[in-house]
Image: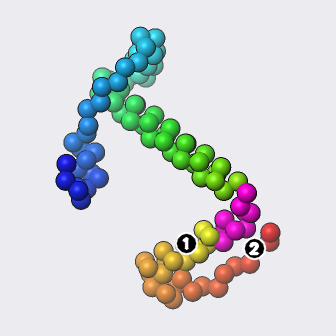
């Protein structure tokens, strides 16, 4: 695969995995999908979604752990600064220079 291939193309092409699960897991998952009227191809979609959710959950947990000792105000200020920067790039400096609303902390 070449660098610079768009995400949509990668999603359409797909990648074949070979995974091994217990017989109980296989039966449970296939029964679960069948009870909801899902077809054979839905197994891949289910697994992909489960992997995405797990990766996201672990990433969030790592970020939360890393920032556990950072005051909420500092995090909110960093978010506000990042939003201003993105808005300045997207809409020009005029909208990004809106006065910062004062929050009670």
Which residues are the magenta region?
69-77
Residue closest to the far bottom: 94
Label 2: element kind: loop
The residue carrying mark 1 is 82
* Cα separation between marks 2 and 1: 17 Å
- Count residues near mark 1 (Cα–Cα under 10 Å), then give few for <14, some for 14-19, many for 20+: few
- Counting residues from the start of the chain, the first of labels 2 and 1 encountered is 1
Whether residue 9 appears in magenta in the rendering, the answer is no
Q: Is residue 85 above or below residue 15?
A: below
Rendered residue at 70%/68% (across/down): 74
Q: How many marks?
A: 2
List x then y, in percent, for residue 44: 33, 30
List x then y, in percent, for residue 7: 29, 53
Name the image quarter holding residue 11: top left
* Left or right: 1, with 69 as reference point: left
Q: Is residue 10 above or below residue 97?
A: above
Rendered residue at 64%/53% (across/down): 66
Q: Nearer the viewer, residue 31 or 60?
A: 60
Can the viewer see residue 34 in this picture?
no
List x then y, in percent, for residue 103: 75, 73
Label 1: element kind: helix
Q: Nearer the viewer, residue 22 or 65?
A: 65
The residue carrying mark 2 is 103
- Count residues near mark 2 (Cα–Cα under 10 Å), then give few for <14, some for 14-19, many for 20+: few
Name the image quarter holding residue 69: bottom right
* Left or right: 69, with 28 as reference point: right
List x then y, in percent, for residue 37: 38, 22
Rendered residue at 64%/85% (across/down): 99
Rendered residue at 24%/59% (across/down): 4
* Left or right: 105, with 92 as reference point: right
């Amino acid at each position: 695969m070449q660098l610079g291939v768009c995400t949509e193309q990668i999603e359409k092409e797909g990648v074949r995995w070979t995974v091994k699960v217990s017989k109980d897991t296989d039966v449970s998952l296939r029964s679960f999908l069948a009870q909801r009227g899902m077809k054979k191809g839905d197994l891949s979609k289910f697994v992909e979604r489960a992997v995405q959710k797990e990766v996201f959950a672990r990433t969030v947990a790592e970020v939360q752990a890393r920032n556990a000792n950072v005051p909420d105000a500092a995090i909110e200020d960093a978010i506000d600064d990042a939003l201003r920067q993105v808005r300045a790039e997207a809409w020009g400096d005029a909208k990004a220079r809106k006065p910062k609303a004062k929050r009670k902390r």
